[in-house]
Amino acid sequence: MNVRRRLLTGTAIAGATALSLGTLSACSGASDKDGKPQVVASFYPMEFLAKQIIGHADVRVDTLTKPGVEPHDLELKPRQVGDLNKADVVVYLKGLQPAVDEAVGQSEAKHKVDAATLTSLEKHGASEHGHDHEGHDHGDEGHDHAEGEHEGGHEHDHGGEAGGDPHVWLDPTKYAEVAKGLNKKLAEAYPDHRADFQKNTDALVTKLTALDKEFTAGLKNRTTDTFITTHAAFGYLAERYGLDQEGISGVSPEAEASPARIKEIQEIAKKEKVSTVFFETLASNKGAKTVAEDTGLKTGVLDPIEGINDKSKGDDYFEVMRANLAALKQALGAR
């Protein structure tokens, strides 16, 4: 569902996070220059999970994608490739960052965790219509999958070949599934910290469950279900809360929308009483401005949270997600 050039070829892929999971044994456990065991994450959503789960344990978490860098376009330096080889754990989301996928595949890391295997991926398009479960039920009915489904070789529809949407972290419930799976992988790598990791994971899942409830309540009384975004990253969020996402299809954030799509967006905006075109923080807002000027709509920020920088509306995942909720409530006329 990502509209970036790289993913428009039909290879919308699983959100990338490379963490090479290694054991903490004296012989096989790798460590950084400070002597601490090391986890490497491919980009912010994976880094955030790892840090939340690891907590105060004496394990260092580094990321390959520095703040302000657009993760899809990441190119690795030789030093970063070396870090992958030395890391205990590499966490990544296969398909989102081609350079990371290649480096992880060639690395000597014993524990490589593809976050896409920790939940189920789905195919989303530029126009994503959420399925409004009665009462926004977040149970297992056809949407969530039993934990066991994600292990034991169950094949998921993900990766560049299948075109699975990688943006699972934008649905708090699916992000919690990834957290539970990553907890197990980290416990395998660092068994001495298993109890602490479990405690931290339980606390994180509780916070994610509360966030899900905030979105459900906050978006309940709305005047429209439709929102328009240049970066069609919000398919899981749209599906979870019964919304309709309209991405500016076939256009990267830096490119201009086609006249035909602008006309279509105009018609959708008028019909669905849409007030706002959303852009993101890590890419140019030129596409959104073009559409807004040609449609008479306002512009706003809906952050896919692929990284945190000084332009982000918050210092971490939870703060930015709540800023996204506030933006959606205003755009959708929720009261």
Image: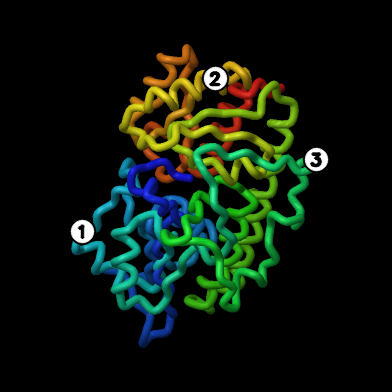
Residue at 39% across, 63% down: 18
State the separation of the CA atoms marked 2 and 3: 29 Å
Q: Which residue is mark 1?
A: 77
Q: Which disc number belongs to residue 143?
A: none
Which secondary structure, mark 2?
A: helix
Disc 1 vs disc 2: Cβ atoms closer than 8 Å?
no
What kind of residue is marked 1? Lys
Extreme-front residue of the structure: 260
Which secondary structure, mark 3?
A: helix
The part of the image, by quadrant, that contains residue 203 is bottom right
What kind of residue is marked 2? Glu
Disc 1 vs disc 3: Cβ atoms closer than 8 Å?
no
- First-in-chain label (1 vs 2): 1
Q: Image height check: is 106 above or below 74?
A: below
Q: Image height check: is 72 above or below 191?
A: above
Q: Which residue is mark 2?
A: 267
State the separation of the CA atoms marked 1 and 2: 46 Å
Mark 1 surroundings within 10 Å by alpha-carbon count, few (fewer than 14), some (14 through 19), many (20 or more) = few
Nearest to the eye among marks 1 and 2: give it: 2
Q: Quadrant of the C terminus?
A: top right
Residue 230 horizontal/vertical position (percent): 44, 32
Residue 38 horizontal/vertical position (percent): 37, 68
Residue at 33% across, 48% down: 6
Q: Which residue is mark 3?
A: 135
Extreme-left residue of the structure: 78
- First-in-chain label (2 vs 3): 3
Residue 85 horizontal/vertical position (percent): 29, 73
What kind of residue is marked 3? Gly
Tell whether 263 sits left or right of 7.
Answer: right
Residue at 42% across, 84% down: 25
Q: Nearer the viewer, residue 34 or 272?
A: 272
